[in-house]
Image (tube, rainbow, N blue to C red):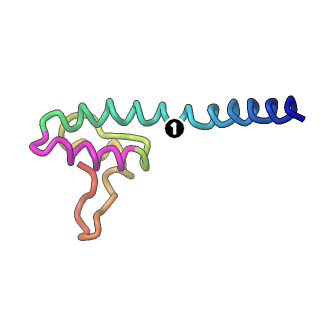
Amino acid sequence: MKLLFATLLLCSLLLSSSFLEPVMAVSGFCTNKCSDRCSKAGVKDRCMKYCGICCEECKCVPSGTYGNKHECPCYRDKKNNKGKAKCP
């Protein structure tokens, strides 16, 4: 019985780690892209927060520190509750 439980536990850990890896890769991608995007921002921590949210949802960040939003329509079209652009 203990061997069966240990085997099931090991299998569940292996399966769960395979599901988490792509999420962590996206986060690394977003961190790097948002660092570049927000490098010249006046309020860097806020820029990083919203850029990260938008990147996780859209899976892309426009190049450069400003503009170029045509490269990522999802990122460009996100709006906050006031109807203004959500993504920096």
Q: From the viewer's perspective, is 50 left or right of 15?
A: left
Residue sitting at x 57%, y 36%: 20
Most common SS among magenta residues: helix
Looking at the rendering, the stretch of residues picked out in magenta corresponds to 41-55
The stretch drawn in magenta includes residue 84: no
Q: From this viewpoint, which residue is outermost toward the front?
A: 2
Quarter occupied by residue 62: top left
Q: Please name the residue that numbered disc 1 is placed on.
A: 23
Q: Nearer the viewer, residue 13 or 51?
A: 13
Q: Which of these two is toward me, 42 or 7?
A: 7
Question: Where, by quadrant of the figure, is residue 27 drawn?
Answer: top left
Image-based side of 55 in relation to 23, left or right: left
Q: Residue 10 at what x, y percent from top left?
A: 74, 30
Question: Would residue 18 be found to the left or right of residue 55 on screen?
Answer: right
Which residue appears farthest toward the bottom when viewing the image?
82
| Quarter assignment of residue 85 | bottom left
- Judged from this view, the residue extending furthest toward the left is 42
Task: Name the residue type under label 1.
Answer: Val
Q: Position of residue 13 (x, y in %)?
A: 68, 33
Please provide percent x and percent y for residue 34. 28, 37
Residue at disc 1, secondary structure: helix
Q: Quadrant of the N terminus?
A: top right
